[in-house]
Image (tube, rainbow, N blue to C red):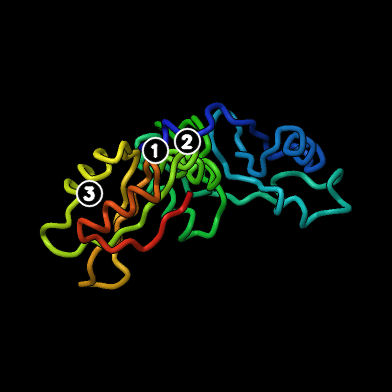
Amino acid sequence: MLVGKRMTKEPVTTTPDEYLAGVMAKMEQGGFRHMPVVQGGKLLGIVTDRDARQHIGFLEKTKVNAAMTENAVTVTPQATLEEAAQLLLKRKIGSVPVVQEGKLVGIITSSDILKAFLEVMGVEEEGTARIDVMLAGDEQDLTTASETISAEGGEILSVGTYREKWGADPICYLRVREGDPEKIAEALKKRGYTILGVHV
């Protein structure tokens, strides 16, 4: 999934000469915590509610240019959400401006990425359950698991795998809907799968 599909387009912006009191009012009204700083169509930096709170008591007298982070790291709309997430984690920041050909076109936040992740995993869908299984051996593959789930009236919405350590058998988490999760888990167990958990 690309940043351009999940970013907030045309975000509320500020200028270096605006006072922090006005910035805080906009953030409170809009329900956001990060605001790109632009001038003449050029991105100069970013200011956050945390930056502004450093000047509590002087918000009416302090301008954005005294609190903002200059030369903010950016991404393009073509960047993947994984790349944006790695950037947020590495830099320990909550958002990153999205720039195309030198022009600000949006902003992507950690909340945007988390929401996208939950949607991809099918967590937002009502009536779903997550079944965690261990994949061990050639006969225990996703095709067999999918056939078993379908036979029990279930449907796989999303799949993810990981290993707790290098060389270990992969653990697979299946987001399913329809069918009885407990019966599906029991059917998988009869096919030789190790069930690690059923989360409804």
Q: Position of residue 169 (x, y in %)?
A: 22, 67
Q: CA distance from mark 3 to mark 1?
A: 14 Å
Indicate which label's residue lies in the foreground, 2 or 3.
Answer: 3
| Residues under numbered marks 1 and 2 in contact, where contact means CB atoms less than 8 Å apart | yes
Residue placed under numbered mark 1 in the picture: 177
- What residue is at 40 percent from the left and 40 percent from the top? 120
Q: Secondary structure at mark 3?
A: helix
Q: Earlier in the sequence, mark 3 or mark 1?
A: 3
Q: Earlier in the sequence, mark 2 or mark 3?
A: 2
On residue 145, which mark appears? 3
Residue type at mark 3 is Ala
Q: SS class of the residue under badge 1?
A: strand
Residue appearing at x 64%, y 31% in the figure? 12
Q: Nearer the viewer, residue 170 or 166?
A: 170
Circles 3 and 1: CB atoms closer than 8 Å? no
Image coords of residue 27 (percent x, y): 72, 38
User: In terms of depth relative to the viewer, which is nearer, 117 or 100?
Assistant: 117
Indicate the amino acid at tag 1: Arg
Q: Secondary structure at mark 2?
A: loop
Per the model, the C-alpha gap separating discs 1 and 2 is 9 Å
In the picture of the structure, the residue carrying the numbered disc 2 is 125
